[in-house]
Amino acid sequence: MVRKSSLRFALLGGVLAVVAALLAGLVIPKWLLFLTTMAASHGVVTLGIVLQMRGGVASFGQGMVFAAGGYAAALLFNQAGLTDAVLLVLAGGVAATLISAPFAPLLARYRGIFFAMLTLALSMVMYGILVKSSALGGSDGFNVGRPTLFGAKIPDESANYAIYAISVVATGVMAIVARVYFESTRGLVSLAMRENELRVEYLGGSVAAVMTSNFLIAAFMGGAGGALTVLALGHIDPNFSYWTTSGEFVFAAILAGHHSVLAVFVASFVLEVVRSFSNLYFPNTWQLALGIFLLVVIRFLPRGIGSLWLDRRRKPAPTVAAAGSVSR
């Protein structure tokens, strides 16, 4: 059961963050607008990995659901004539969930490196299928047109901001839902599983059921993030499912830590900034720059960016007795 105070805080904080982001989008330059759009859409995918990390596992195959959602949205746009951005994002999430559902009970049995490698294998199988499928554009992929919003055509002059606003609102809604889920009974059971699965089973909890639901929720987030990315880029290709794409999401999850939803999007934005400028100034060694950046973060923030404010908030104030003993 979710605590009412936590629910109110999550709703208020999420709404204020979305409103602030929408207002900021009116004044920031176009290059930063696009970069933030990518950070928001990728942040949702990373949030799915963080959700699983809270249960003690990490998916190295999030690219599979990322690609599934992206291809579903792109095909619906080009083949079925579905152009509404909101429906495409929802369809991407549903498609990724349906594709992941047959594998969820199997993956719920595995932990550690076995879970990571199995999810990575699924992602690479999808990559192989997409590359060989000429109907889906093969290795080159295909383009996607500009979506509509609630049946209305988006004007050319405001297209960048419209896609940005759609991404911010969609990710804001999913971030609020994730925050509420983290505080729910099942979300707290996930944390308990991370510490001691056997004790959870003794207390009557179903580890397999929680693992399965976490995997499917993460799949929906990954698919929605893939659809948002396709709408922003206007193109999709098999690299959405490649292992390096999954690795970038894991990179951001490690950078954020599993303690805070806000930290996930901060980490995703930082990653996009570092990658963009590293690629600009070090085009041949930008991966090295990213690796060094991650090592520095792990060295000084081993629990992720979220620990910066969570540790400060949880730090107990010194008692009178402790202060007296120190003075003596």
Image: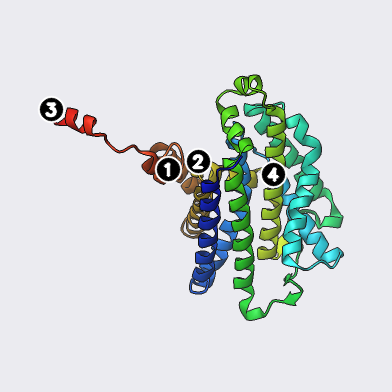
Mark closest to the chain's N terminus, 1 or 4 = 4
Q: Which residue is mark 2?
A: 259
Q: Position of residue 121 (x, y in %)?
A: 73, 36
Residue 264 shown left or right of residue 229 in the figure: left
Mark closest to the chain's N terminus, 3 or 1 = 1
| Amino acid type of the residue tagged 3 in the rendering | Arg
Residues at discs 1 and 2 in contact (Cβ within 8 Å): yes
Of marks 3 and 1, the one in the foreground: 3
Q: Which residue is mark 3?
A: 328
Q: Is residue 233 above or below residue 153?
A: above
Of marks 4 and 3, the one in the foreground: 3
Q: CA distance from mark 4 to mark 3?
A: 55 Å
Q: Position of residue 69 (x, y in %)?
A: 74, 53
| Amino acid type of the residue tagged 2 in the rendering | His
The residue lying furthest to the front in this view is 4
Quarter of the picture holding the C terminus? top left
Q: CA distance from mark 4 to mark 2?
A: 18 Å
Mark 1: secondary structure:
helix
Residues at discs 4 and 2 in contact (Cβ within 8 Å): no
Mark closest to the chain's N terminus, 3 or 2 = 2
Q: Which residue is mark 1?
A: 310
Q: Position of residue 35 (x, y in %)?
A: 55, 62
Mark closest to the chain's N terminus, 1 or 2 = 2
Q: Which residue is mark 4?
A: 217
Q: CA distance from mark 3 to mark 2?
A: 38 Å
